[in-house]
Amino acid sequence: TNFWVNNGTIIGNGTLATSFRQSSTGSTVASNGVLALFGTYNSGQATFTSSGGGFGTFRAATSGTLRVIGNVASGMGGSWQVDNGGTLEVAGVNVDLGAAFMPMSQLNGTVRVNTGGNLTLSSATAGGPTLGQQGTFQFDASSGAANIFMPNSSGLANFTNAGTIFITGNSSGT
């Protein structure tokens, strides 16, 4: 398999239909539109893997939507950020960010999980667990469930919702 190596910045909108090895200095940024990740090309799914032990940063900037359109398996790391006015969208796929760095201070925009989507938040073992959010969690479950999971949370005293949680459609979000 061929990979592009990203030690700098990928910024913009469109679909990244190729696989990347992203280093700790690499950034993938959705700005001013939708940047779709983990799509399918040549009958295979695009991936992001670590280069040199780091995954870098994935960011939905103001007016940008970082749309995940393919499944993301356990072990995906990186620092995930959603700026005020930005959106991280799980488009009906399974996204496991349990090994990612996603503290509350980095979730200031909208995290949207569409029908059939499952998002696993960062766990305590990742060094920056998701114990709250300051923006909006949106469950867009028009024809089925949409889920957000918290791993390793048995001792969690509370989840701080400093923003808004929306459930839209005829179904439920959990």
Image (cartoon, rainbow, N blue to C red):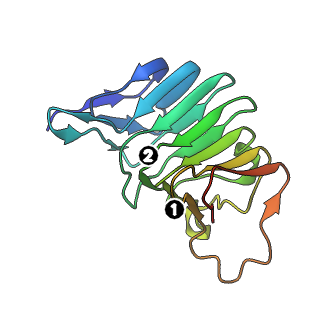
Residue 36 % position (x, y): 43, 30
Amino acid carrying mark 2 in the image: Gly
Q: Quadrant of residue 111?
A: top right
Q: Position of residue 44 (x, y in %)?
A: 18, 40
Q: Is 128 in front, or is 150?
A: 150
Residue beneath the point at 35% across and 26% down: 16
Determine the residue positioned at 16% across, 33% down: 2
The kind of residue tagged 1 is Gly
Residue 49 is left or right of residue 1, and the answer is right
Which residue carries the number 2 mark? Answer: 54
Q: CB of mark 1 within 8 Å of CB of mark 2? A: no
Question: Residue 162, position in %: x, y?
Answer: 85, 52
Residue at disc 2, secondary structure: loop
Please determine whether, in this image, residue 82 is positioned above or below residue 163: above
The crowd level at tag 2 (other Cα within 10 Å; few <14, some 14-19, many 20+) is some
Badge 1 marks a residue whose secondary structure is loop
Q: Nearer the viewer, mark 1 or mark 2?
A: 1
Residue occupied by mark 1:
98
